Amino acid sequence: MKTIFHGKRVSGLLSVLPETAVRFEDEVDNYTFPAKQTLRLQKVMGYKQHRIVKESTATSDLCCAGLEYILERGWLKKEEIGGIVVATTLPDHFIPPVSSIIHGKFSLSKDVACVDISQGCVAFFWGLLEAFMLLEHMEGKKVLVFAADVLSKKVSRKDRNSFPLIGDAAGIAVVENYPDAGDIHTILYNNGGRGAALKIPAGGSRMPCTPETAILRDVDGDGNLRALDNLVMDGSEVFTFVQTEVPPMIEEILAYAGLCKEEIDWYLFHQPNKFMLRKLAEKLGVPYEKMPMNTVEEFGNSSGACIPVNITYNLADAMKREMSRCCVSAFGSGLTWGAMVMDLGEMDFCEMLLSDL
């Protein structure tokens, strides 16, 4: 997919994270590996801590806490909401969708369009696409994009390959029509043949959850214990995918937008880990300081919420004060990878909220 969106902008951005921060050192004993070996991994990958929700917290709780915060501060009125897009891997239930739960919680008008999509690490990117398309059919209304996940509930705490990375969070964007906004150049690619690289085998119609699917096993013989109910990630396959597919896509999106690398103020990428992002920056010839990559060490990889967490943590003041030309890119499950060149800034709000969830 390659297209240009006209007259759209992100007018506000909020990320919501749990207050609970768990340090990497405190989880070393979870794993079957020697502590010294595990601590060496911390230095290479940039692990420090991650944010994990309480056992009772669901995806909609993060979303609703954020929307309540936005409404209370007068940054948005309920009657301005024309659509809700929720992009999540782990909804509260199969039915009803999270977007409908949010709709009911805030007693929104019956003509508000509600839709859930499942796009993993590309959730925020896809949520923006859905919002842009919905806005083509809305006059004077705004669309809320929620990219939210509580993947800590689906990753084995004895899987050193995945658990230290994972963080729980929600990102909320207010998206609206704005005739004076710059064009948004967009590219999106998929390769379903490589989808097994990031997978939760059990829980759907192919393999419903049973007591058998909950048993922890060392399936790969690498010392990591996980069940079929848990996320399984082929780290080397994902690394190869990112390093081979993302750089040419970034070159392509810049050419499509008629820009050179130096004309981009910020490269706002999905945050898998610092090691992978440093390699990407080097391959692209982009200065580290233009590609923020410090959120995984502070909050964990929050899947589809990574990009809003990155922006609100690193660029909150700049996003409220001035307009910046940004290259936004996400890549992950599917396997899917996409990029946008867009102007971001002069927002009504850009904040991070820590919540007791």
Image (cartoon, rainbow, N blue to C red):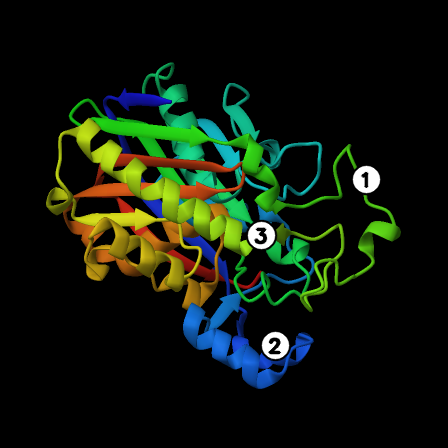
Image vertical order of residue 343 relative to residue 279, above or below: above
- Compared across the picture, whether 19 is left or right of 222 comes to left
Q: Residue flagged by tag 1: what amino acid is it?
A: Pro
x, y percent for residue 201: 72, 44
Q: Is residue 44 above or below residue 104?
A: below
Q: Secondary structure at mark 3?
A: loop
Q: In the rendered image, which residue does mark 2 sit on?
A: 27
Q: Which type of secondary structure does the marked residue at label 2 adopt?
A: helix
Q: Amino acid at mark 3?
A: Asp
The quadrant of the rendering that contains the C terminus is bottom right
Residue 125 shows in the view:
yes
Q: Earlier in the sequence, mark 1 or mark 3?
A: 1
Give the camera-side residue of 98 and 64: 98
- Give the Cα distance between marks 1 and 3: 22 Å
Q: Which mark is residue 90?
A: none
At which x and y percent is residue 30? 67, 75
| Marks 2 and 1, the one that precedes in the sequence | 2
Question: Relative to 183, is 249 above or below?
Answer: below
Pointer 1 residue: 208
Mark-to-mark CA distance, 2 and 1: 30 Å
Q: CA distance from mark 3 to mark 2?
A: 22 Å
Residue 81 in percent (x, y) is at: 42, 29
